[in-house]
Amino acid sequence: MSTTKPMFAEERKEQIIKMVNEHEKIYVPEMSKLFNVSAATIRNDLNELEKSGRLIRTHGGAISIQNSGLELNTEQKKIKNINSKYLIAQEALELIQDDDIILMDTGTTTYQLATLLKDKRNVTIITNDIEIALELEEVTGLNVILVGGMLRKGFHCTLGPFANKFLSEISVDKAFIATNGIDIETGLYTPDTNQAAIKENMISCAREKYLVCDSSKFGRKSFTKFANISDFDMIITDSYIEDEDYDQICKYTKVIKA
């Protein structure tokens, strides 16, 4: 049954997001009929919603990100919750001292942290994220070590046995780790098994472990678990975290709200 009340484009997009999250997938013809607009209009809506990181386009429709278990690529992640990621990065920056040796996991929040490191001195940054390495390449006072390995196309990072061997043979002061999802009862998740192995090794070789993630990651699981919440010395997230989630996580580790 089609809607009879005219909608603004933004109202229609919000309804589309609500429906795709409720039903896991939607189809262009159904949406066209429901909202009484052309199929081309719906396709444009879906394309714009995908660009903003709110759903995943498929042939003939779209599927929900929160239920798909699929991972946004680096370019899609960049534009999602960008303000929260910057505030989280500012909090994480306070934990880094001159002369530290730190590990930076691949991710858009860790990339935001990298952009803030330019006033630090004699800090060694080890990372498997190509964009982080490029961001810091010309910065005086910083030493950058790019972890070698197989390039994960579309995600601007390295992984695989060469990367894991290197990480298993080093020791660092601090590690800043990203995640795709957090289930408070069971732990932290990522869709890729190779990425999970990298994260596990990064956590193992660090004296202090910090998780940096925005609140949209809470209550979400993905394919592979790589850590427990209690493995971290601190979780840095944004102020939008639900009070119930905050209280539960504080039972396992310290939480900072940016």
Image (cartoon, grey):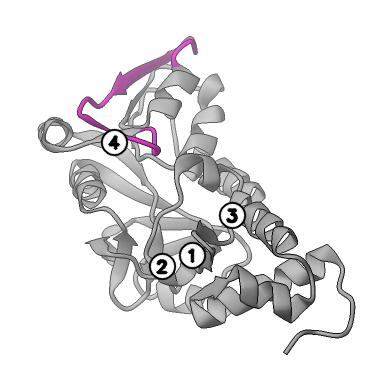
Q: Position of residue 191 (x, y in %)?
A: 31, 58
Could you say which disc has been placed on residue 50 in the image? Answer: 3
Q: Within the magenta stretch, is there residue 144?
A: yes
Residue beneath the point at 59% across and 60% down: 54
Secondary structure beneath label 4: strand
Q: Is residue 94 left or right of residue 206?
A: right
The quadrant of the picture occupied by the N terminus is bottom right
- State the image quarter where residue 154 is shown: top left
Badge 1 crowding class, 10 Å Cα cut-off, few under 14, some 14 to 19, many 20 or more, is many
Badge 4 is on which residue? 173
Q: What amino acid does circle 4 point to?
A: Asp
Magenta part of the protein: which range?
137-156
Residue beneath the point at 40% across and 23% down: 133
Verify CB contact (< 8 Å) between mark 2 and mark 3: no
Q: Is residue 139 left or right of residue 9?
A: left
Secondary structure beneath label 3: helix
Q: Nearer the viewer, mark 2 or mark 4?
A: 2
- Label 3 vs label 1: CA separation? 10 Å
Mark 2 or mark 4: name the one nearer the start of the chain: 2
Residue beneath the point at 44% across and 30% down: 97
